[in-house]
Image (cartoon, grey):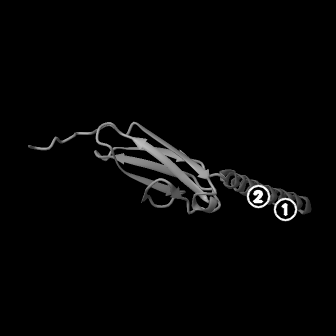
């Protein structure tokens, strides 16, 4: 009998993912636990990308390689029709990256302000001496 070919154009129904630290898993290092379901053709594979790196095919649980925990984590699951659903998780210490961005902006602002003040001072001094 010919097998039924499923024309699946609907992405997986749901994808639940979270970052956990459990002393019983990965020596307490952060891991991503995820689960997904698809009623049409089933889940065929899952992929994770940490930060702006490359996508890696993985299984749950997945031990994160970003030991600092500052990078965003994207999880996507594919069904048999190659449709996917994706979620983005914030790294457990993502606030450090935000603070670093704020600090960089503050330092850059101070430098621009200092350069502006120096230019105004030089212009005023030059006009005063002529």
Residue 20 spot, x, y in % from top left: 60, 50
Quadrant, the C terminus? bottom right
Of badges 1 and 2, nearer the viewer stands 2
Residue at left offset 47%, top offset 50%: 75
**CA separation, marks 1 and 2?**
22 Å
- For marks 1 and 2, the one nearer the N-term is 2
Rendered view: 95 above or below 4: below
Residue 42 spot, x, y in % from top left: 32, 43
Q: Residue furthest right?
A: 129
Rendered view: 92 above or below 42: below
Label 2, residues with CA under 10 Å away: few <14, some 14-19, many ≥20: few
Residue at left offset 22%, top offset 39%: 7
Q: Residue furthest front?
A: 24
Q: Is residue 124 left or right of residue 104?
A: right
Q: Which residue is mark 1?
A: 122
Q: Which residue is mark 2?
A: 107
């Amino acid at each position: 009998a010919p097998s039924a070919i499923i024309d699946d154009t609907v992405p997986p129904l749901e994808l639940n993912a979270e970052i956990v630290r459990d002393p019983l898993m990965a020596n307490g290092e952060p891991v991503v636990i995820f689960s997904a379901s698809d009623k049409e053709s089933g889940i065929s594979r899952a992929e994770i990308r940490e930060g702006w790196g490359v996508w890696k095919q993985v299984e749950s649980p997945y031990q994160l390689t970003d030991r600092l925990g500052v990078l965003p984590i994207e999880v996507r699951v594919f069904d048999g029709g190659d449709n996917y659903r994706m979620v983005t998780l914030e790294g457990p210490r993502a606030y450090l990256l935000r603070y670093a961005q704020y600090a960089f902006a503050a330092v850059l602002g101070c430098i621009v302000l200092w350069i502006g003040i120096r230019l105004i001072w030089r212009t005023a001094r030059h006009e005063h001496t002529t």
